[in-house]
Image (cartoon, helix red, strand yellow):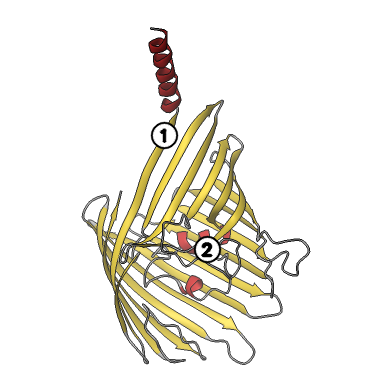
């Protein structure tokens, strides 16, 4: 009898604890037929993530009381065309894993949240990446991805950083938002590369009604040179369409400097959406200044809230020795390249 009462008490306590917590399984499976043509070689392939990045994730939150909560987020990239996992960079330097198994490369964080904002620890997007993806009609996915990302000189931390300590402002500041992030290469202090992979990044913005604008800055130390990145972007919702633009600059100390911009829009049409963008990026080098210009046009048709069909066309024109090519094709310096994506995305 005593054992039964103890067991009931444990179950009741466990139920109370579970009532204050939640864990969610989520993901995206996006399959893409991609074709690229160039002046040297063409390529046809079944790949993934032409509209949204394929992923598998787990996230959870626990109410700690007093307006505070703890949360975690584990998100793995997937190559659903061949069944492998994504790749990750463990120290913000050149080496990356080869992938194959399940790797939480997209995000792996634990957070403490409250009226003070959020403190987030682990691998996450860098502040300097947010403006490139939020203010890109193609969301930096597929053949339409902005040249400001495709050609970026920002190095291994252009998109994500490992070993990061981040802080986010609370969401009750009248539309103002911001974050700060410090990430570490985790090297020994008595080596030449002791700061390799260390960086500091900041982002601040304002979103209210139809307007959303933000700017970001980062300074990352690498063994060969430091890289400073600066970008700003904005979006305005006209009701019948959303227009967006961003500017990005990457400056390698005592080296090359890259500059580029994007202008584009999203136009809702019935159950779907038209996406269009023009982007360019120039690398300033002595006597060269190679530049790649991209024009991208796409359409997404929503079959439901979770399933969509999409098609994208992109054309890249190369100038001054640039040799950008699309969807795995190969093109000679100064020649053009075309790319096509056709796919289906399902989210859960």
Foreground of the two, 233 or 156: 156
As helix, strand or loop, the secondary structure at mark 2 comes to loop
Secondary structure of residue under mark 1: strand
Disc 1 marks which residue?
22
From the viewer's perspective, tell me whether residue 245 is left or right of residue 122. Answer: left
Q: Position of residue 222 (x, y in %)?
A: 67, 69
Residue at point 47%, 71% (across, down): 262
Is residue 4 left or right of 185 when viewed as pictured? Answer: left
Q: Nearer the viewer, mark 1 or mark 2?
A: 1
Within-10-Å neighbours for mark 2: few <14, some 14–19, many 20+: some
* Residue 83: mark in rendering: none
Q: Nearer the viewer, residue 67 or 163?
A: 163
Picture quarter with the N terminus: top left
Q: Residue at x 50, y 62 (%)?
A: 88
Q: Along the horizontal axis of the image, is 4 left or right of 90? A: left
Q: Position of residue 61 (x, y in %)?
A: 47, 36
Above or below: residue 225 compared with residue 28: below
Query: Which one is in front, 245 or 4?
Result: 4
* Near-viewer residue (156 or 255): 156
Badge 1 density bin: few <14, some 14–19, many ≥20, Cα 10 Å: few
Q: Residue at x 58, y 64 (%)?
A: 157
Q: Using the rendered view, name the quadrant where residue 183 is placed.
A: bottom right
- Residue 34: x and y in percent read 30, 74
Q: Which residue is mark 2?
A: 159
Residue 339, image quadrant:
bottom left
Residue in the image at 35% along x and 54% along y: 239
Q: CA distance from mark 1 to mark 2?
A: 29 Å
């Amino acid at each position: 009898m005593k054992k039964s009462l103890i067991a009931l008490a444990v179950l009741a306590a466990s139920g109370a604890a579970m009532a204050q917590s939640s864990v969610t399984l989520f993901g995206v499976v996006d399959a893409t037929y991609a074709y690229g043509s160039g002046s040297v070689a063409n390529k046809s392939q079944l790949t993934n993530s032409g509209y949204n990045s394929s992923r598998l994730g787990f996230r959870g939150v626990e109410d700690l009381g007093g307006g505070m909560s703890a949360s975690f987020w584990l998100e793995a990239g997937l190559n659903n065309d061949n069944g492998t996992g994504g790749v990750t960079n463990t120290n913000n330097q050149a080496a990356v894993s080869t992938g194959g198994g399940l790797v939480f490369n997209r995000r792996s964080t634990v957070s403490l949240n409250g009226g003070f904002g959020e403190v987030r620890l682990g691998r996450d997007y860098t502040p300097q990446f947010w403006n490139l993806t939020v203010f890109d009609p193609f969301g930096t996915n597929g053949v339409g991805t902005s040249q400001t990302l495709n050609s970026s000189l920002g190095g291994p931390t252009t998109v994500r950083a490992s070993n990061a300590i981040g802080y986010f402002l609370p969401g009750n500041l009248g539309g103002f938002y911001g974050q700060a992030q410090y990430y570490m290469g985790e090297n020994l202090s008595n080596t030449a590369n002791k700061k390799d992979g260390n960086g500091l990044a900041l982002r601040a913005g304002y979103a209210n009604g139809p307007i959303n604008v933000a700017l970001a800055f980062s300074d990352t130390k690498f063994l060969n040179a430091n890289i400073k990145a600066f970008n700003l972007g904005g979006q305005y919702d006209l009701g019948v369409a959303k227009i967006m633009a961003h500017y990005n600059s990457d400056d390698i100390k005592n080296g090359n400097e890259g500059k580029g911009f994007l202008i584009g829009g999203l136009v809702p049409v019935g159950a779907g959406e038209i996406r269009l963008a023009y982007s360019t990026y120039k690398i300033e080098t002595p006597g060269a200044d190679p530049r790649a210009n991209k024009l991208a046009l796409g359409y997404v048709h929503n079959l439901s809230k979770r399933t969509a069909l999409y098609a994208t066309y992109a054309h890249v024109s190369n100038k001054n020795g640039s040799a950008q090519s699309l969807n795995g094709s190969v093109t000679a310096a100064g020649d053009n390249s075309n790319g096509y994506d056709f796919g289906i995305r399902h989210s859960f």
